């Protein structure tokens, strides 16, 4: 490059610098962080210790020597049907049917049976046979097998179930 071109380039750069510095102006009076005072910086404040209120101690409950136990109800059946077995079944007069189960101990409590899931039978213990539960109701079928379940009346819990053959009803 020639000396003349160098001089023109330097002069134009100098003009640009002057022009740009003239457009800059002064710094704004406030910024996003808040007001900034104009002028030289001032002394910085040092943090001081402030007293923090403390909580007043309260009495903590001490566990008692004997814990309190809340009883929870448990299911107890009135009779033990775990060893019960089917005894007999058969038609009765008037289109009724009988299902009987036998236990190893006397039957206690009240029971009902459901035959074919929706036919309710009443159940009773005969004084002459305290270990047997006799359930009777309308005959649910003829010459067919039907399922039955015996329930404890107080809890509606099933205690015994089975399947039995229904013969022709007696008239």
Image: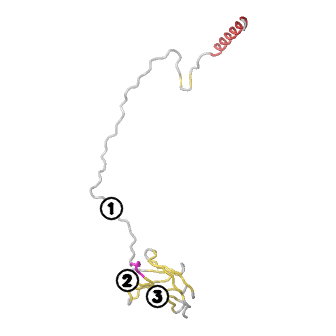
In magenta segment, residue 82:
yes
In depth, the one of 27 and 20 nearer the eye is 20
Residue depicted at x 44% and y 18%: 43
Structural distance between the alpha carbons of marks 3 and 1 = 47 Å
Numbered badge on residue 69: 1
Q: What is the crowding at mark 2: few (fewer than 14 residues within 10 Å), some, or many (at least 20)? A: some
Count of numbered labels shown in the rendering: 3
In magenta segment, residue 95:
no
Residue depicted at x 55% and y 84%: 145
Stretch in magenta: 80-84
Q: Is residue 34 left or right of residue 78?
A: right
Structural distance between the alpha carbons of marks 1 and 2 = 36 Å
Mark 1 lies on a secondary structure that is: loop
Mark 2 lies on a secondary structure that is: loop
Decide: is 104 above or below 5.
below
Classify the position of the C terminus by image quarter. bottom right
Numbered badge on residue 88: 3
Predominant SS of the magenta segment: loop
Tell which residue pokes out farthest to the front in this image: 1
Structural distance between the alpha carbons of marks 3 and 2 = 16 Å
Closer to the chain start, of discs 3 and 2, is 3
Disc nearest the viewer among 1 and 2? 2
Q: What is the crowding at mark 3: few (fewer than 14 residues within 10 Å), some, or many (at least 20)? A: few
Numbered badge on residue 57: none
Q: Position of residue 140 (x, y in %)?
A: 55, 85
Numbered badge on residue 104: 2
In depth, the one of 112 and 8 nearer the eye is 8
Q: Position of residue 79 (x, y in %)?
A: 39, 79
Q: Position of residue 130 (x, y in %)?
A: 38, 86
Mark 3 lies on a secondary structure that is: strand
């Amino acid at each position: 490059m020639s000396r003349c071109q160098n001089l023109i380039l330097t002069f134009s750069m100098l003009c640009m610098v002057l022009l740009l510095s003239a457009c800059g102006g002064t710094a704004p009076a406030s910024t996003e962080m808040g007001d900034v005072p104009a002028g030289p910086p001032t002394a910085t404040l040092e943090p001081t210790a402030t007293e923090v209120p403390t909580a007043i101690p309260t009495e903590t409950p001490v566990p008692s020597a004997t814990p309190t136990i809340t009883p929870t109800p448990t299911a107890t059946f009135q009779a033990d049907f775990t060893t019960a077995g089917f005894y007999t079944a058969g038609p009765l007069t008037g289109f009724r049917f009988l299902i009987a189960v036998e236990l190893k101990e006397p039957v206690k409590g009240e029971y009902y049976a459901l035959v074919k899931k929706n036919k309710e039978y009443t159940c009773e213990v005969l004084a002459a046979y305290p270990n047997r539960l006799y359930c009777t109701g309308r005959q649910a079928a003829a010459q067919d097998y039907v399922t039955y379940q015996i329930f404890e009346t107080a809890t509606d819990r099933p205690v015994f179930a089975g399947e039995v053959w229904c013969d022709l009803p007696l008239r």
